[in-house]
Image (cartoon, rainbow, N blue to C red):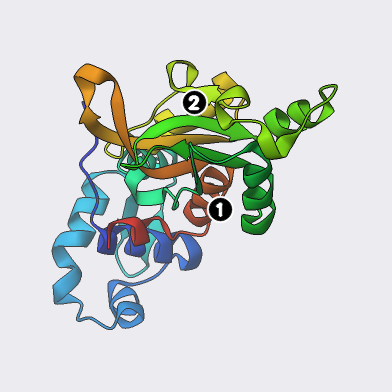
Amino acid sequence: MNPIPLSDRQKKIAEIVRRSGPITGTEIAGELGLTRAALRSDLAILTMGGILDARPRVGYFYTGKSTLGMLVEELSSITIEDIMSVPIVVSASKSAYDAVVTMFLEDVGTLFVVDGKGCLFGVISRKDLLKASLSQGADLHNLPLAMVMTGLSKIVLSKPHEPAAAAARRLIEREVDCLPVVLPFDEKKGKWKLVGRVSKTNMTRLLAELAEGKGGTYHS
């Protein structure tokens, strides 16, 4: 059976009790700037769910019973769209040299190659450009991006509505630093509109904010 989803206020209450328990309902209400009566239903849900325990004349205790469940619930509710960044792109008509300059100026390790309609055409990494520059007789100014990039057929795609955890798993399994986030443009022709990117940095930031209790900011 799936756990009952907790509201942001219920998560805040659980965190207050975990940090300061034993603590009375009145003291919890004071920290939140609410009345004790306003928290009655929230405290009842948390107590019935086994997250909190209450003792007369003592207050509420944090049981720790559902700590992992709360984290899993929070993580499973966060989508790729919640954490993705703006993709750094380069036109398919540009050269490998242009890609090097763009990568340097934007301070990124991955570029997304797009056509004139903003559809994903390929991906270029630092490794791709380094390999091209080391080729004998290489002239990056005249080297087409199609000769350097990883083509669309070999790229792992992510969709905005998918769980963030799914993107994390793909990053690990494919051993890449970044994934494109796309929406259908013309599926029959295999064309995808590039709308974002999700990287190891996005995942690290998500993990840090969850650890700091800021996960609710993704749903505000």
User: Quick check: 41 above or below 88?
Assistant: below
Q: Nearer the viewer, residue 80 or 138?
A: 138
Q: Quadrant of residue 39?
A: bottom left
Q: Which residue is mark 2?
A: 169
Disc 1 crowd, CA 10 A, few/some/many (<14, 14-19, 20+): few
Could you tell me which residue is drawn at 56 percent across and 53 percent down?
208
Q: Is residue 215 visible?
A: yes
User: Quick check: 2 above or below 218?
Assistant: above
Q: Nearer the viewer, residue 46 or 118?
A: 118
Mark identifier at residue 16: none
Estimate the x, y position of residue 1 in percent, counting from the top left: 21, 26
Estimate the x, y position of residue 97 in percent, counting from the top left: 68, 42
Q: Quadrant of residue 62?
A: bottom left
Q: Residue furthest front?
A: 142
- Asked if residue 110 lies left or right of residue 2, the reply is right
Q: Which residue is mark 1?
A: 208
Q: Quadrant of the C terminus?
A: bottom left
Q: CA distance from mark 1 to mark 2?
A: 17 Å
What amino acid type is highlighted by mark number 2?
A: Arg
Could you tell me which residue is drawn at 49 percent across and 32 percent down?
168
Disc 2 crowd, CA 10 A, few/some/many (<14, 14-19, 20+): few
- Asked if residue 151 lies left or right of residue 219, the reply is right
Badge 1 marks a residue whose secondary structure is helix
Estimate the x, y position of residue 163 in percent, counting from the top left: 34, 35
- Asked if residue 220 lies left or right of residue 101, the reply is left
- Asked if residue 40 lies left or right of residue 172, the reply is left
What amino acid type is highlighted by mark number 1?
A: Ala
Q: Is residue 70 visible?
A: no
Estimate the x, y position of residue 95 in percent, counting from the top left: 61, 38
Badge 2 marks a residue whose secondary structure is helix
